[in-house]
Amino acid sequence: MATTFTPRVFSGIQPSGGLTLGNYLGAIKRFVDMQADEFETIYCMVDLHAITVWQDPADLRRNTRELCAGFIASGIDPEQSVLFNQSQVPEHTQLGWIFNTVARMGWLNRMTQFKDKAGKNRENSSVGLFAYPALMAADILIYHATHVPVGEDQKQHVELTRDIAAKFNHDYGVDFFPVTEPVIEGAATRVMSLRDGSKKMSKSDASDMSRINMTDDADAIAQKIRKARTDPDALPSEVEGLKDRPEARNLVNIFAAMDDRSVEAVLADVGGKQFSEFKPMLADLAVAKLSPISTEMARLMEHPDEIDKILDRGATRAREIASPILKKTYEIVGMVGS
Ligand code: AQP
């Protein structure tokens, strides 16, 4: 009989820079929603992933705390959810090594994120950047997580996690790791750059005008939206009218996700408006939703010791779940036991 797994959510974010609106709408806001559902929820600052590209140590430390503050300020309750820093739970890397032996070179070679991040500099990329998806599979499966809320860009990595789980189960003749479901839902699963509708909004984009940072003040948010690239036409009343208009679609998607409405409902209201009218509406909405979060983040950042305590306690709780799963994995592989 197939094993029944506890409904459990795992997801992570890299402390590789300040949080963006893309991280918030594509990931954190949905982490908060899933906390209210029937799941156990485990959320992680994935610092081991962050260092697959160079991170200044002082920045990494600060970004990890700020990310934790961002989670809590957005509504993640550290009592209800397990909130911790990946490097403090060594079971991730221990299982990650085993998954390095399960994943095939050909599978990793197909990962578009590696191609994007390595770019023309493939030979000079870290081995860790290439192996990133096998560690991500371990992040998820060390908790037997059944559901992983992510943005569209991480879909391929979650599919690889499923492949690794299936191959491990098949090779060792067990039904031990769940075949995890990616949860990619809502209007903003891929928030695009404000400067280029074909590029994802990203923490590490060279242009600060391309993104809204969660720490931006009201003036910066309004200015970035005012300067966001658009086309000269008015907004359509129907979704089909956004076809081949990536910048317009992006701003409408952001509006819908922030207002918890469907794109159809938003267009029914704003169809026919020029961007000169729509952009201030979007800026007001963004400021109203993001300001309380950034204020709370700043308050939490005044108490770094408290953040460290929360992360320490989260790591202890995470290890309580991860440790028996690693032990059983070692038994299955034949490294311990009779
Ligand atoms: N633009 C986006 N739209 C929707 N979701 C997004 N996510 C990231 N950018 C967008 C989602 O946020 C979660 C955490 O992402 P990450 O920090 O682990 O890595 P990333 O996807 O590589 O994010 P960045 O901002 O682009 O970081 P850098 O610049 O360091 O590479 C994931 O669920 C992701 O889908």
Image (spheres, rainbow, N blue to C red):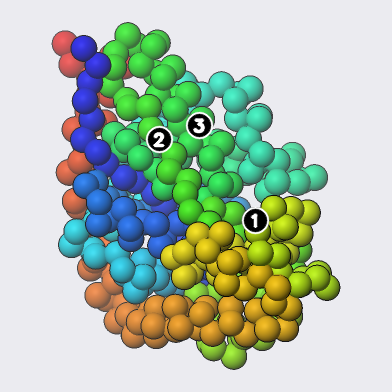
80 and 131: which one is in front? 80
Q: Can you identify the residue that label 3 sits on?
A: 159
Q: CA distance from mark 3 to mark 2?
A: 8 Å
Residue occupied by mark 1: 239
Query: Label 1 is placed on what type of residue?
Result: Val
Label 1 near label 3: C-beta < 8 Å? no
Q: Going from the N terminus, do you reach mark 3 or mark 2 first?
A: 3
Q: CA distance from mark 3 to mark 1?
A: 29 Å
- Split into 4 quadrants, where in the image is the N terminus? top left
Q: Secondary structure at mark 2?
A: strand
Camera-side mark, 3 or 1: 1
Q: As shown in the figure, which amino acid type bears the numbered disc 3?
A: Glu
Q: Is residue 94 visible?
A: no
Give the farthest residue toward the right: 232
* For marks 3 and 1 on the same chain, the one whose residue lies earlier in the sequence: 3
Residue drawn at x 37%, y 27% as measured from the top left: 179
Q: Is residue 307 visible?
A: yes
Where is 318 relative to 172, above or below?
below
